[in-house]
Amino acid sequence: MSTFSYLPEPVAAPDRPEPVPVSAEEVARAVEAVRPASPSGLAGGPARARALFRVADAVEAAGERLAAVQSRETGRPVRISLTDVTAVVRTLASFAGWADKLEYARTAAAGSGPRTGVVAVLLDAHAPLRTAVDRVAPLLAAGCGVVVSSAAPLTVLALAELAEGLPIAVLPGVDPETLAAHPGIDTVERHRPAGSAAVLVFAAAALDQAVDAIVEGAFCAAGRDAPRLLVQESVADELLVLLGARLTRLRAGDALDRTTDLPPYPAALRERVDVLVREAVEDGVRESVWWPGQGSGSRPTPPVVLVGAAPAMRVVALPEPAPVLPVLTFRTVDEAVSSTNALPGLRTAAVWTSDTGIADATLAGLRAGALALNARPDEAPTLPRGLL
């Protein structure tokens, strides 16, 4: 099998400045600037709704620029960043629709309803457009003030510039723990640990469509959760042939090139993939299929598919976001549901089948934060986030 020399480190903007440390006084000013004027929240629900709708329109208009900023800062392919913008617009519009309805959930008696305050949101560098809006939009809809510390500050700052009229501040140079410990912060929301993202493919599925969604979700637009593929035994071989063929068509390159599919893999991640594959081989995985990229190199290049994985293997039992896809098989609906629910930290599950009876039985039994039928869960960003 041919191999490919490893991709470069994530693209960085040439004019990206080093974050300037933020003083305690600046943190205090930011906290007070976004603090709600009353316990029931900053501004009324209708005003918050109008402001969020305006932000959604502004993000849509600035979509090309926001996608380019994210791709330059994080290396996320711009094709995927553009889909992130679309999801962000829909999420903002969804919570804008909730903003003027949340008032009715409050108790009429003075002081007895839910209280709002200032929330510190601590974000990593993964998909900052979507992650920031997923975390911040519901807080703004509820009337909270928000102070954000992000490991991808350029993207979040570009987004916050469009949030006119809403109580949000971004502090690029602040230490996350310093912000979280500030006495003016009422609540801290941290990025959650990695979990499992499962895809279940039954014999009655449209396998071509399922394979496209699997590759896109596990490798191209990968989330922070570890992908897991469960396939019915009777179609496992056919699906794996299609999956291998799909891998050969993946393109690597400049993050700002719209034909690029794969993000760049930093050296630390590449080394971790080597370890995961080596452990899987030691645990008895039947086969490892690496991406057959073009070029030359002494080591295989991710992404990689691990065929013949089992629940007890370390690569399955320890959820770790990486371009590694373990493939497990099942025979019955009950086995599929049981194996999926046993995955550690199950966050999302996508079921692929044209059989409505199987679909109903499977979806009814799964315990995940978000479910999807014949689609990727992240393709419906306005779904309730559940355990996400």
Image: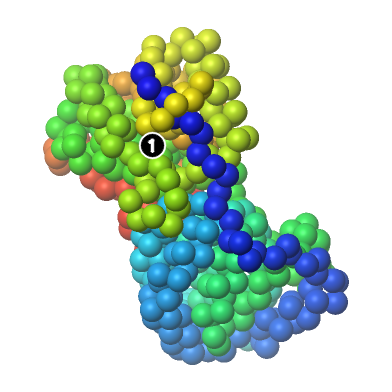
Tell me: residue 76, above or below residue 243: below
| Camera sees residue 121 | no
x, y percent for residue 371: 34, 47
Give the residue at x 80% y 76%: 26
Q: Nearer the viewer, residue 331 or 29?
A: 29
Give the residue at x 45% y 52%: 255
Tell me: residue 351, above or below residue 45: above
Give the residue at x 71% y 84%: 33
Q: Nearer the viewer, residue 365 or 18?
A: 18
Quarter of the image for residue 340 reads top left
Image color mode:
rainbow
Give the residue at x 37% y 48%: 260
x, y percent for residue 124: 62, 53
Tell me: residue 209, above or below residue 118: above
x, y percent for residue 57: 39, 81
Quarter of the image for residue 125 reads bottom right
Quarter of the image for residue 197 reads top left
Left or right of residue 376: residue 253: right
x, y percent for residue 139: 56, 71
Q: Residues within 10 Å of mark 1 (few under 14, many from 20)?
A: many
Q: Which residue is mark 1?
A: 198
| Camera sees residue 174 | yes
Q: Nearer the viewer, residue 299 or 122?
A: 299
Q: Nearer the viewer, residue 15 or 264?
A: 15
